[in-house]
Amino acid sequence: MATFISVPLKKSSEVDLVKPLSKFVTSTYPASEDQGEYLRAVEELNKLRKSALGRPLDKHESSLEILLRYYDQLCAVEPKFPFSENQLCLTFTWKDAFDKGSLFGGSVKLALASLGYEKTCVLFNVAALASQIASEQNLDNDEGLKTSAKYYQLASGAFGHIKDTVLSALNREPTMDISPETVGTLSLIMLAQAQEVFFLKATSDKMKDAVIAKLANQAADFYGDAFKQCQYKDNLPKYFYFQEVLPVLAAKHCIMQANAELHQSVLAKQKKRFGEEIARLQHAAELVKTVASRYDEYVSVKDLTDKINRCLTAAKKDNDFIYHDRVPEVKDLEHIGKAALVKPTAITPPLSQKFSDLFEKMVPMAVQQSMSIYSQRKAETVNRLVGTMREATNLCNGVLASLNLPAALEDLSGDSIPQSIAEKARNVVQHGGLQSIEQLIKDLPELLTRNREILDESLKMLDDEETTDNELRTKFSQRWSRTPSGDLYKPLRTEGANFRNILDKAVQADQVVRDRYSTHCAMIALLCKPENELNAAIPSANPTKTLQGSEVVNVLRSLLAQLEEVKKERETMEGEIKAVTFDMSITFLTALAQDGAINEEQLSLGQLDQLYGSYNQRVQASLRTQEELLGKVQTSHQEFSSLKQSNADSNQREEVLKKLASAHDSYMEISNNLREGTKFYNDLTEILLKFQNKCSDIVFARKTERDELLKYVSARSFQAGEGVSCFTITFKCSLQPLTLKCFDYTSLSRLLSFPCRYYQMPMGYNPYAYGQYNMPNMPNMPYMPYQTPGQGGYPGTAPAGQPYPGYPQQPPQQQPYYPQQ
C-alpha cells in the first residue's frame, strides 16, 4: 500500500544576476570600502542560483539544502535591492511544473520582473523536492518514518505559504501550478501523507488500537479534504498530474478509513461488543473491495484485504456459535475519534541551518531610502543656515558700500587709493580677474548642452520602447498581458520632467549671473589694472585731514571692526555647520527592527533639531547683532558726512569708490556663483548618467521580456492556427478513424513518425482531450477510452456538486464529511 504522491519541480531559464546587481552596487556605493565585498557577494549569489536551479537535483537532503539557502538569500536581499519593473529590473522565466506542453507548442511558462515571483517558484521547488525526498524514504525503520513525516510537513507548509502569498507577490494571474487552488490542494495532500506516516509509525510501534484508529481516521479525513479540493476545482482536473492523483486520493481515503475501522473493531472486541466488531470489519471489507475494484491500478490492498477478511471470518464464526450479538447498521456505529499529529511547517526564514547572508553589511532599502531623505533634509537645513548668514553678510557689504565705508575713513587725504580699495583690487587679481569669470561663463553653455543631450537621449529610449509596446499591444490585444510601458515609465518620466525643470531654472540663473556681470564689468576691469592706473582713474578731491582722529571717525572704525568680527564668526560657524556628522543608519535600523517600519520624518526632524538647534539660535543672534551695528553705523555716518566738506570733486570721487567696492563684492559673488554653477552642471551630469543607465536597464529588460512574450504569444497563435495554412490528415486505425490538422511540414513529419496504434494510457486520460476541450480548427470528436477485458473504466470527473462515482459515503448520522462552504 506504500504509494505516496510527490510533486515535480519547476524549471527556470537562466538569468544573469551579476550585471544588473553589480551596476546597482557600483552606482549606490561608489566610494564605499564595502563595494568590493558586495560585488563578490553578487558573484556568489549568481553561483548559488545556478547550483539551485541550473542543474538537475538529486532526491537528497543536500540538494534541498542548496534550494533552502537560495530561498533564504532571496528573502535577505529583497529589502536591500530595489527590485521592481521600473528600478532594478530582473526578469525571471519559469515553466509550469505540470504542463508538459502539446505536440505543436511548448509548455506554459511565465516571465515576470518580480523577485516575489522568483521566491514563490523557488519555494515551490523546495516543497516539491521535499515531497520527493519524503517519498523515497524507507518506511520500514524509524529513521525513514521520521524523515518522511518531517519533509511532508515541510512541503505542506511551503505549499500553504505560497497559497497565502502568491497573489500579492505577483500582482497578476499566476500559472496554474502556483495558483492558490493548486498549491492549496498540494498542501492538503502533503499533510495527509504526513499523517499517514505517523499512522505507519504507530502501527510499527504496536501502539494501542484506539490511538491507531484515531490516527488512521484523521489521515482519512485529510485525504478526503484533499480529494474534495481536487475534484471540485474547475482547473485542476485538466492536469494529467491530477488525473493520476485523484484515484490515489480516493483510494487512500478508503484505505485509511478501513484501517480505522479495523483497529476500532479490535477495541470493540476488547469491550465485548462483538456485533459492533463485525459491523466495523464488514464496513472495512467494503472499503477495500471498492479500492480493489476501482483503483487497483494505483494502489494494492491485497494484504490489507486478506487481514480484514481473516478477522471478519473469525469474528462471524465466534458470534454465530458463541455470542449471538446483534450486528448493528454502519450508520448506527459510534463515530471514531481523530488525532492530528501533524501540521504544516511554518515558513519563517532562514530555513537553512547553514545560511549566512552574503549581503550582511548592506542596509535594507527602507533604511537606504530613509537615509537619502534624511540627507536631503540635512542639506536643506545646512543650506538654509549658511544661506541666511551669507545673505546677511551680502546685505552688510551692500550697506557699507553704499556709504563708501571703510574707504571714506581711509580717504581723508583725497588723492591716494584707500587701503580697503587697494586690498579689494589685489583680491580680484588673485582670483583671476576678468579672464577667470569670462572663461567660466563661456563653459556654461557647453555643460548645459551636454546635460540636455543626456536627458533627451534617456527619454527617447523610453519613447521608442513604449511605441513598440503599444504597437504590439494593438496587434495582440489581450494576449499582450504585460504591464503597459506607459504605466511603467510614469515614475521615470516624472523624474525626467523634474530634471528638465531643473535645467530650465539653471538657465535662468545663468542669465541672472551674466546680467550682473555686465553691470559691474567696467568697474571690475578697473580693479584689475595696475595700482598707478587705478589711482589715476579715481578722481581727486579736497583733503579732509581735519577729520583725522575725530570722535566720529573713531566710532565708525570701532563699529566697522565689530562688523568684521561678526562676519568672521559667521565664516567659522559656517565651517562648523558643514562639518556636523551623525550616522542615522543605526537609528533607522533600530526603528525598523522594533516597529517593522521607519517613521523617517519624525526621527529625522528630531535628530536635526538636536544637531542644528543651537546653531540656529547663534545665527539669529548674529543677525540681531548686525542689525543693531548697521543702525549705529548709519547714524554715525550721517554725522561724519555733515562734517566733511562737500563739493563736486569729492562727490565724484566718493561715487567711484562706492562703485569699486560694490564691483569687488559683485565679483566675488559672481565668481562663487559661476563655480557653483559649474559644479552643479558637473554633478548633474553624473546624476543624469545614472538616470540614463536606469532608463537603459529597464528598456533592455523590457526588450528581453518583450522578446520572450512575443515568442510565447506567437507560438500560441501558431498553435491555434491563426492565419496559418494547415494539412488535414486522417489515420485509419483499428478502433476508429482519427483526423488531425497540422500547421506546417515539421508538424506533419512528427505526426507521420508515430505508429498508428493506441497506447494504453491511465484510465480516463485523453492526451488531446477532444471531447472536453475543443482545439481550434479541429472537429469535436468523442473520446472512447480503451479498456482491458474485465476492467472497469476509470471514473471521470463528477458533475458539479455531486460526489465522485463509486466514492464511499459516510454514515448519514455522522457529521457531514466535507467542510461546508
Image (cartoon, helix red, strand yellow):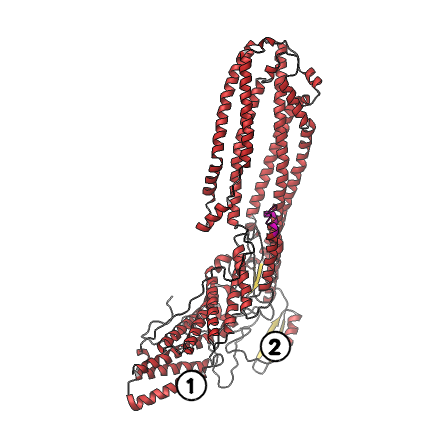
Taking the image as shown, residue 47 lies to the left or right of residue 305, namely right
Nearer-N-terminus badge (1/2): 1
Residue 365 magenta: no
On-image quarter of the C terminus: bottom left
Q: Secondary structure at mark 2?
A: strand
User: Residue 268 — which label?
Assistant: none
What residue sits right under mark 1 in the picture?
306
Say which of marks 1 and 2 sits in front: 1
Camera-side residue of 773 and 723: 773
**Residue 93 location in percent, x, y?**
58, 61
Which of the 4 image quarters holds residue 482? bottom right
**Residue 493 location in percent, x, y?**
57, 45
736 up-or-down from 493: above or below: below
Q: Secondary structure at mark 1?
A: helix
Whether residue 777 appears in this view of the structure is: yes
Residue 28 magenta: yes
For label 1, count other residues whose C-alpha is less than 10 Å away and answer few (under 14), some (14-19) or many (20+).
few
Whether residue 467 appears in this view of the structure is: no
263 up-or-down from 648: above or below: below
Residue at mark 1 to residue at mark 2: CA–CA distance: 50 Å
Q: What amino acid does circle 2 point to?
A: Thr
**Residue 168 location in percent, x, y?**
48, 57
Camera-side residue of 791 and 45: 45
Camera-side residue of 116 and 96: 116
Q: Which residues are magenta?
A: 26-36
What residue sits right under mark 2 in the picture?
730
Camera-side residue of 168 and 99: 168
**Residue 698 location in percent, x, y?**
60, 52
Q: What amino acid does circle 1 point to?
A: Asp
Which of the 4 image quarters holds residue 322? bottom left
171 up-or-down from 218: above or below: above
Residue shown at 54% from the left, 27% from the top:
569
